[in-house]
Image (cartoon, helix red, strand yellow):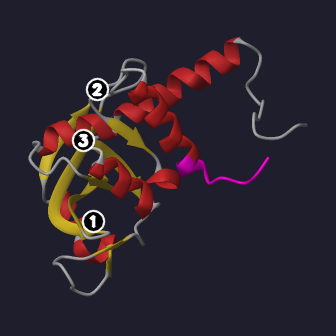
Amino acid sequence: VRYRAKWRIAFDQLLRLDGNGVRFDWLTFDEGYGSKVPFLKLLDLGGQRFVAEVPVSFSVRTEDGGPARRADAVLTAQAAAGGARWRQRRETVADAWWRGAEAEVVVGRRRMRLVAAVNEASAEVKYFVTNAVGEPLRAVLSVAFRRATIEHTFRLAKGEAGLTHYEGRQYT
């Protein structure tokens, strides 16, 4: 067995799925995958739309050949707080209200869009990068926040199966 990065394993799985005729409208994923520029570039080259959560320190450029800047320097939390309002619908708790702002950026020589979103109640700030530059901000945020629903479903299922504290990556 040889080491392969998780993003590389994920990309190989996507290639295998594509070879079997399975294609996704969108992909969304956390900072662990979103911070991997080669992964984002490969998805974009393959025409796969995605919304990737990225760390605030994620490097972007506002123009080709321009200086690299942190995501939170390009789009501040204050800019997001003054942006468009969006509701994250929830079934088991109250809906969450977010505000978001966007900016065109360059990531790995590819044109993308940086999105900053701030929760109105908690002031939590999230940053996303997407290659769906022509899609409305509402659509991008809808995709980005679907991850929370999926993670909640997995958490419930693991609890019902008695695997609440089970960690699948370690032998013990």
Which residue in the structure is indicated by mark 1?
77
Q: CA distance from mark 2 to mark 3?
A: 12 Å
Instruction: Please tell me whether residue 132 belongs to the stretch shown in magenta.
Output: no
Q: Earlier in the sequence, mark 3 or mark 1?
A: 1
Q: Earlier in the sequence, mark 1 or mark 2?
A: 1
Image coords of residue 91 (percent x, y): 37, 18
Label 1: which secondary element: helix
Image coords of residue 153 (percent x, y): 52, 21
Q: Nearer the viewer, mark 2 or mark 3?
A: 3
What residue is at 27 percent from the left and 49 percent from the top?
120
Determine whether, in the image, residue 139 is placed left or right of residue 44: left
Q: Which residues are magenta?
A: 1-8
Which residue in the structure is indicated by mark 3?
141
Query: Label 1: few (<14), some or many (≥20) within 10 Å?
Result: many
What residue is at 68 percent from the left and 12 percent from the top?
160
Label 2: which secondary element: loop
Amino acid carrying label 2: it is: Arg
Q: Earlier in the sequence, mark 2 or mark 3?
A: 2
Viewer-proximal residue, 131 or 117?
A: 131
Amino acid carrying label 1: it is: Ala
